[in-house]
Image: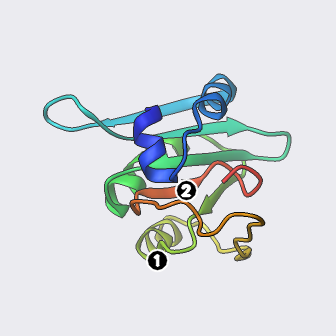
Amino acid sequence: MVKLDEAAFGDNRKLFLKSRIQQAEKAVVLQNEQNKMTGYGLAVRTPSNIVIGPVVAPNAEAAMLVIYELAKNYKEKLRIDLSSHEETLKKLVENHGFQLQNEPPVMAYGVNPLPARQGNLFAIAAQAFG
């Protein structure tokens, strides 16, 4: 999971992931036919909602499957902070009843350029964490 996340995020977040997994109420893992992990997602309860993220998947459709599995059976408010580049997933989650609340800018200081990403980070853990 750490290597998959590092490829998706562009940096090693081993300690963050360990902490986030401990906080998670639900976790979903995607595997291919050879039982190799190809994606994952976490759902964390906060005082005001359930936060779905991070979500890493090979494509938007697979990310939607992860989100669906994480979201099912919850009656509380759900929140997903999508990666800003991901228009396909945005449409898929809107088709499942999610509504766009805002589009915060991505800003960094002392980082030039931002770490390279493979395009398979579909939802971030939260705006504060990326």
Furthest residue to the right? 47
Task: Name the residue nearer the viewer: 75 or 40.
Answer: 40
Left/right of residue 92 with respect to residue 106 in the rendered view: left
Report the residue at 50% width, 72% height from top: 90
At mark 2, the secondary structure is: strand
* Residue beneath disc 1: 87
In the depicted structure, whether residue 115 falls above or below residue 34:
below
Amino acid at pointer 2: Ala
Quarter of the image where the C terminus is located: bottom right
The one of 57 and 98 positioned closer to us in this rendering:
57
Pick the quarter of the image with the N terminus: top left
Image x and y of residue 26, in percent = 56, 30
Q: Is residue 97 left or right of residue 105?
A: left
Q: Say above or below: 7 vs 22.
A: below
Residue beneath disc 2? 123
- As shown in the figure, which amino acid type bears the numbered disc 1? Glu
Q: Secondary structure at mark 1?
A: helix
Res. 73 visible in picture: no
Q: How many marks?
A: 2
Residue 61's mark? none
Measured as percent of width and height from the top left, residue 33 is found at 14, 35
Task: Give me the C-alpha separation between circle 1 and circle 2.
Answer: 12 Å
Up/down of 29 relative to 114, above or below: above
Circles 1 and 2 in contact, beta carbons < 8 Å = no
Going 56% across and 38% down the picture, which residue do you hit?
Answer: 42
